[in-house]
Amino acid sequence: MATTEKPGEPEYRTTSTPAPAGVDFFNLDAILRFLLFSASLVAVVVIVTSNQTELVLFQGRPVPQPAKWRYSPAFVYFVVAFSVSGLYSIITTLASLSLIQRPHLKTKFLLHFLFWDALILGIIASAVGAGSGVAYVGYKGNSHVHWNKICSVYDKFCKHVAGSLAVGLFGTIVVVLLIFLSAFTLHSRVPK
């Protein structure tokens, strides 16, 4: 059976209208990525400078006992994770700044930013969680396994660790904002 519709009718016409431009938040994206770099750098520097040595009684004699971040695998993971996050933020900040001049590549890069930001969020959020768990045991102790508090003795060390974890938590919030920003910008570019 033959159809009565002709190829010139509206159903068969193709439109050459481009996809909508959507909102453009690449200036805010670059600022947030710079904030992520700053938070990563501060978190690493503060925890790396947290070493402290105190005299502790051992069998009735005072013995110098150091507290260093490298003695805890959770703090080592924290330093490595935020070092990776800092390097990632430098690369993506430069990419975001270059995309301000090249608007034709923005949509493709937004999708890549979204995937990589989610990966970095998982890495640094787990590092903050691991470090916070160890810091909590150092602050409160655990009477069930006879682990004593150490923050009453190593006050400078504990303050540095707490400050570093707080800045690290701020960094994870920045990455969540970056993910929301990329998702919203991508959503606004989808034709309705």
Image (tube, helix red, strand yellow):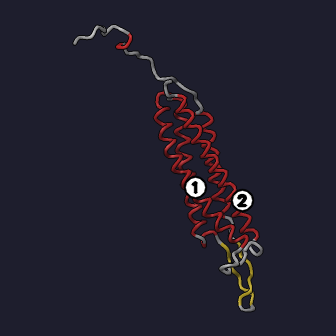
Q: Which mark is residue 163?
A: 2
Q: Residue at x 74, y 64 (%)?
A: 159
- Residue 132 in which image quadrant: bottom right
Q: Which mark is residue 191?
A: none
Q: Residue at x 35, y 8 (%)?
A: 9
Q: Residue at x 74, y 86 (%)?
A: 57
Name the N-terminal-most of marks 2 and 1: 1
Please, what secondary structure does the residue beneath circle 2 have? helix
Q: Nearer the viewer, mark 2 or mark 1?
A: 1
Q: Position of residue 20 (x, y in %)?
A: 50, 23
Q: Position of residue 39 (x, y in %)?
A: 65, 51
In this view, 97 is above or below 14:
below
In this view, 99 is above or below 20:
below
Looking at numbered disc 2 in the image, what kind of residue is underneath it? Answer: Gly
- Residue 84 in which image quadrant: bottom right
Tell me the quarter of the image containing the N terminus: top left
Q: CA distance from mark 2 to mark 1?
A: 15 Å
Q: Position of residue 164 (x, y in %)?
A: 68, 59
**Residue at the left extreme, as displayed:** 1
In this view, 167 is above or below 59:
above
Q: Which mark is residue 124?
A: 1
Taking depth in this image into account, of 75 and 97 the one nearest to the observer is: 75
Taking depth in this image into account, of 37 and 72 the one nearest to the observer is: 72
Crowding around mark 2 (Cα neighbors within 10 Å: few <14, some 14 to 19, many 20+) is some
Q: Position of residue 135 (x, y in %)?
A: 68, 67
Looking at numbered disc 1 in the image, what kind of residue is underneath it? Answer: Ile
